[in-house]
Image (cartoon, coloured by chain):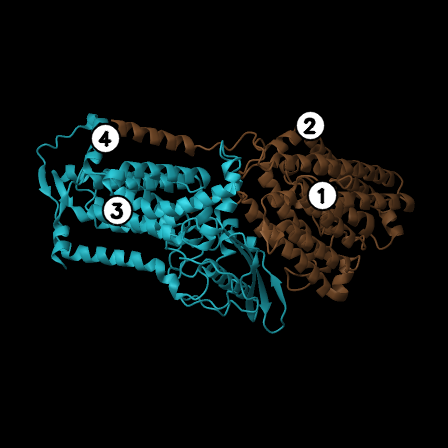
């Protein structure tokens, strides 16, 4: 009888333990544990939200100057719009990686902001016919910063020609409408993302620190690495350098029509990535809980130093390689593409450190693998 | 054959333990198939991928599109037939074939557990698991009061081999003296109630778990065999497997092992379980009193026993084939699978492929996500046979696209058990020229470290 009771008891125990609870707030508590909630708090309060709050007004300023340009197209309003375009584009480099929460829910906010190269024919057809829908995936590569880049720098051969497109051209109204729709779309989506962060999502983000496929911590790690690998390494350097194609593709650089800022934008993005890794506040130099301190807590020592030091050294090396490039990557690709591939290789090595060594150390439940383990 | 062995072969025992085992096995397998289906894994693992990683020599076994569901259905139906004991021999053969076919379709999803099921179901083909408490009894109006004792012992032996080999594999310097990979895995379980923030974070606990896991695997078969320690051992089995279930995503396996461990109990115990079933089945009460009662004897025991002996000889020697390879087993994984090396290492990689035109020297990198699912990419990135097979697939693909003089090079970094990622594949080897074989792969770069032990 006792044996039967024991059997029943163990079966009940079995069932009880197997139903794991994936939801709810977690993290923190015990004294000897790394506080992952603190990591998320630092990310949200000192990096993500300040970055957006920096980017949002800059985009609004850009919107204002574009409205002025549209109202009175001339060399002076064009220059102002261009200046604010670059300021906002640099600020954008700090938020593109945060593809979580509202940004993800808006069918990937960054798809509407920075897909390049632009498809000129889509823009030109849209301008001349008035038939376009910026909300559809077909127009991902015909809006956002790259579309502004084309409209403000590349729509005609010189500045006078560009101003003419918006004033005397037969399609002037079409250009004005398209430009206005693009900036309105960008501003509208950005405001939604910012509002979401400041009215509730922040708490949800900070409290979801469990090690499950859907927790913000795990998603953030995945998104961070994905951005570094795709948005930074591949899009900014690898693809134009021809790493993924038989020949280099000099026209696929970021800010192609501007023609002189691709390096500046890439460096800005690398700084943003490294600051997130180190938990460095967006404003100021204070640092807080971060991937770096998490690796230190876990004592992830490799070859006599902490993995975080190895990763930082690799970021620094990549930065040095990028700094050696022409400020216009298109030019660099044409004159000496090997320097581009050298920079790519330096960036790629950090992908391995992040994707293999860091993820292994965190033992993150990766979102993409849905099957039993051994 | 010695006389004592002959006497042993002629020993008989009550068939109840084997009947309970058959029911438990059938039910567990049915649940596994249903769970697999319901999780959508047939789709994600076997239908969606464009390309499947095959076992060497089994490239002809592939998913068959939407008909793959039929194989799973067949497997589930045969599991059900096994559970109720209807047309048992046919059902278990059908189960073995369909299950093994499924496992051979794509090695991305290889699990020791699945191999265990294949091996066990093969053994069960030769066992009279329908001798008692089966629908077959009803149909034939015949039941058996005894079966050869060795039939039940053979399952115990197989379970013993699995545990002991799993234990031997843990006797290595990384597991015992670095607490690797538990030192990586356990701290990430910080969100478990009670133990997550305390024990899981302590280094001594990682060591304690490593050592006790090794000792558990090595001694549990002996504790189960011995009558005096059996209940204690079964308690350990339940605790151990439930604990691993809580810690790791290992699906049905813990429950299968717990049910399997019941085979070690005496027939009284199993008769009591069957009585519970009898009460549940009361509405369908069958009058089995006037069934013929016989001792079960093999018609061709002279044929079956050598098969079983060869089967075990294979099981005992095959895991040691790694000794034929010169390099570090964990690094090259030559001879790693099918050896009960369960949850033994933490290994990850990142591997990129370059397609080069041998004449112009021009080349480009492949985006792996164009061809592989993320699960396949993950598994491919640190296993040399995957890397080679994929390299050939890429070579063929680009050849068909019209590329000429194709060479395929891989740049691969792999991190093993808390060591920094390091180059894994010789970047100067054109993998498109290399052929898969059982010979050591000389294009795997050296490990530069040593893991001592089994």
Name the residue carrying label 3.
B156
Name the residue carrying label 4.
B277
The number of numbered badges drawn on the structure is 4
Left or right: residue A309 compared with residue A6: right
Using the image as rendered, state which of residue B118 and residue A150 is in the foreground: B118
Q: In the structure shown, which secondary structural element does the residue marked by tag 3 occupy?
A: helix
| N-term mark: 4 or 3 | 3
In the rendered image, residue B10, in percent from the top left (x then y), is placed at 12, 50
Using the image as rendered, state which of residue B340 and residue A258 is in the foreground: B340
Question: Looking at the figure, which quarter contains the N terminus of chain A?
Answer: top left
CA distance separating discs 2 and 1:
23 Å
Chain to which mark 2 belongs: A
CA distance separating discs 2 and 4:
58 Å
Q: In the structure shown, which secondary structural element does the residue marked by tag 1 occupy?
A: loop
For the residues carrying marks 4 and 3, which lies nearer the camera in this image? 3
Chain in brown colour: A
In the rendered image, residue A358, in percent from the top left (x then y), is placed at 59, 48
Name the residue carrying label 1.
A113
Chain to which mark 3 belongs: B
Left or right: residue A273 compared with residue B348: right
Q: In the structure shown, which secondary structural element does the residue marked by tag 2 occupy?
A: helix
CA distance separating discs 1 and 3:
63 Å
Chain to which mark 1 belongs: A
Residue B419 visible to an observer of this rendering: yes
Name the residue carrying label 2.
A199
Chain to which mark 4 belongs: B
């Amino acid at each position: 009888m006792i044996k039967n009771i024991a059997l029943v008891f163990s079966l009940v125990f079995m069932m009880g333990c197997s139903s794991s609870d994936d939801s709810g707030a977690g993290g923190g508590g015990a004294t000897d544990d790394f506080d992952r909630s603190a990591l998320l708090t630092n990310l949200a309060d000192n990096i993500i939200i300040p970055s957006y709050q920096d980017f949002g007004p800059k985009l609004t300023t850009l919107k204002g100057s574009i409205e002025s340009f549209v109202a009175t197209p001339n060399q002076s309003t064009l220059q102002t719009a261009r200046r604010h375009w670059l300021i906002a584009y640099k600020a954008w480099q700090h938020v593109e990686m945060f593809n979580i929460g509202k940004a993800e829910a808006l069918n990937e906010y960054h798809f509407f902001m920075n897909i390049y190269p632009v498809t000129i024919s889509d823009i030109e057809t849209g301008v001349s016919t008035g038939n376009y829908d910026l909300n559809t995936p077909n127009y991902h590569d015909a809006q956002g910063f790259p579309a502004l880049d084309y409209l403000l720098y590349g729509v005609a051969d010189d500045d006078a020609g560009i101003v003419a497109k918006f004033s005397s051209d037969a399609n002037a109204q079409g250009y004005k409408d398209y430009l206005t729709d693009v900036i309105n779309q960008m501003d509208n989506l950005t405001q939604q993302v910012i509002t979401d962060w400041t009215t509730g999502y922040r708490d949800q983000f900070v409290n979801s620190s469990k090690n499950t496929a859907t927790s913000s911590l795990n998603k953030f790690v995945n998104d961070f690495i994905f951005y570094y690998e795709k948005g930074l390494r591949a899009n900014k350097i690898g693809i134009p350098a021809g790493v993924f194609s038989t020949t280099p593709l000099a026209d696929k650089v970021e800010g192609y029509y501007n023609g002189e800022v691709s390096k500046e934008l890439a460096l800005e993005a690398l700084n943003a990535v490294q600051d997130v890794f180190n938990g460095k506040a967006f404003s100021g130099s204070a640092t807080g809980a971060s991937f770096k301190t998490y690796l230190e807590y876990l004592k992830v020592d490799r070859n006599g130093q902490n993995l975080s030091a190895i990763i930082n050294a690799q970021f620094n090396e990549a930065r040095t390689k990028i700094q050696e490039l022409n400020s216009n990557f298109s030019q660099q690709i044409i004159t000496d593409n090997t320097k581009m591939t050298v920079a790519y290789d330096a960036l790629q090595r950090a992908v391995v450190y992040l994707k293999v060594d860091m993820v292994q150390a965190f033992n993150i439940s990766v979102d993409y693998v849905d099957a039993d383990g051994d | 054959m010695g006389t004592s062995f002959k006497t042993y072969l002629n020993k008989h025992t009550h068939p109840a333990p084997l009947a309970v085992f058959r029911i438990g096995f059938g039910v567990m397998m049915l649940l596994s198939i249903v769970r697999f289906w319901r999780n959508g894994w047939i789709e994600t693992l076997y239908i969606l991928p464009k390309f499947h990683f095959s076992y060497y020599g089994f490239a002809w076994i592939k998913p068959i599109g939407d008909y793959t569901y039929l194989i799973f259905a067949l497997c589930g139906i045969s599991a059900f037939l096994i559970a109720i004991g209807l047309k048992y021999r046919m059902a278990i053969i059908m189960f073995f074939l369909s299950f093994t076919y499924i496992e051979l379709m794509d090695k991305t999803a290889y699990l020791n557990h699945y191999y265990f099921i294949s091996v066990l179901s093969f053994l069960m083909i030769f066992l009279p698991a329908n001798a008692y408490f089966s629908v077959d009894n009803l149909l034939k109006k015949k039941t058996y009061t005894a079966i050869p004792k060795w039939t039940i012992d053979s399952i115990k032996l197989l379970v013993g081999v699995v545990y002991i080999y799993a234990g031997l594999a843990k006797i290595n310097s990384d597991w015992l003296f670095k607490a690797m990979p538990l030192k990586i895995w356990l701290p990430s379980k910080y969100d478990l109630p009670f133990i997550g923030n305390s024990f899981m974070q302590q280094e001594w606990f990682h060591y304690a778990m490593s050592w006790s896991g090794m000792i558990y695997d090595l001694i549990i078969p002996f504790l189960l065999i011995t009558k005096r320690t059996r209940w204690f051992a079964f308690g350990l089995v339940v605790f151990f497997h439930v604990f691993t279930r809580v810690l790791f995503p290992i699906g049905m396996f813990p429950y299968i092992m717990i049910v399997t461990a019941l085979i070690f109990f005496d027939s009284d115990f199993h008769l009591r379980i069957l009585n519970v079933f009898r009460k549940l089945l009361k509405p369908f009460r069958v009058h089995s009193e006037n069934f013929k009662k016989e001792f079960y004897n093999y018609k061709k025991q002279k044929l079956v026993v050598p098969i079983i002996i060869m089967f075990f000889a294979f099981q005992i020697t095959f895991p040691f084939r790694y000794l034929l390879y010169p390099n570090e087993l964990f690094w090259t994984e030559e001879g790693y699978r099918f050896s009960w090396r369960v949850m033994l290492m933490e290994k990850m990689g990142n591997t990129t492929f370059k397609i080069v035109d041998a004449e112009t020297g021009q080349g480009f990198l492949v985006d792996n996500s164009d061809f592989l699912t993320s699960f396949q990419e993950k598994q491919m990135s640190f296993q040399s046979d995957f890397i080679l097979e994929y390299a050939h697939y890429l070579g063929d693909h680009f050849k068909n696209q019209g590329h000429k003089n194709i060479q395929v090079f891989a740049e691969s970094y792999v991190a093993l058990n808390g060591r920094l990622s390091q180059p894994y594949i010789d970047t100067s080897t054109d993998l498109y020229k290399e052929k898969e074989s059982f010979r050591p792969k000389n294009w795997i770069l050296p490990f530069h470290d040593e893991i001592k032990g089994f």
